[in-house]
Amino acid sequence: MNKMSTKRLQSEYKRILANQPPYIETHPDPDDILLWHFAVISPPNCPYTNGIYYGTITFPKEYPMKPPAIKMLTPSR
């Protein structure tokens, strides 16, 4: 694993925890800092109220020089 990507992702995770965006939860996999799980929670008074949408973000070893891959696990409606 690339030391630069690990440090960068740890730093970004601390920043997210300190300033959590509304309606979004994201956490790295406890066994792999390059794999993150996320949930987007629908805000109230929107067409998708009570919806929760899950996905993963897979960061390459070369991150931040290469972009992550985002995969939605919740099927489209």
Image (tube, rainbow, N blue to C red):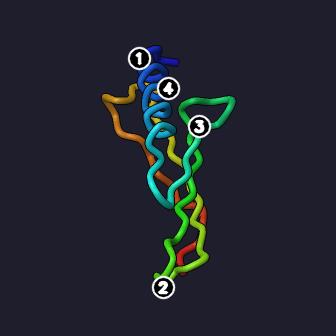
Residue on which disc 4 sits: 10
Q: Does 35 appear above or below 65?
A: below
Q: Are the residues at dot 1 and dot 3 in contact (C-beta closer than 8 Å)?
A: no
Mark identifier at residue 18: none
Q: Is residue 19 left or right of residue 50?
A: left
- CA separation, marks 4 and 3? 9 Å
Q: Find numbered disc 1 in the image and state the secondary structure of the residue it sits on.
A: helix
Q: Residues within 10 Å of mark 2 (few under 14, many from 20)?
A: few
**Nearer-N-terminus badge (1/3):** 1
Q: Is residue 58 left or right of residue 52?
A: left
Q: Nearer the viewer, mark 3 or mark 2?
A: 2
Q: Residue furthest left?
A: 65
Q: Find numbered disc 3 in the image and state the secondary structure of the residue it sits on.
A: strand
Residue on which disc 1 sits: 4
**Amino acid marked by disc 3:** Pro
**Residue at x 52%, y 80% (from the top left corner):** 48
Q: Quadrant of residue 41?
A: bottom right
Residue on which disc 3 sits: 28
Q: Find numbered disc 4 in the image and state the secondary structure of the residue it sits on.
A: helix
Mark identifier at residue 47: 2
Q: Nearer the viewer, mark 1 or mark 4?
A: 4
Q: Find numbered disc 2 in the image and state the secondary structure of the residue it sits on.
A: loop
Q: Position of residue 50 (x, y in %)?
A: 61, 76
**Amino acid marked by disc 2:** Pro
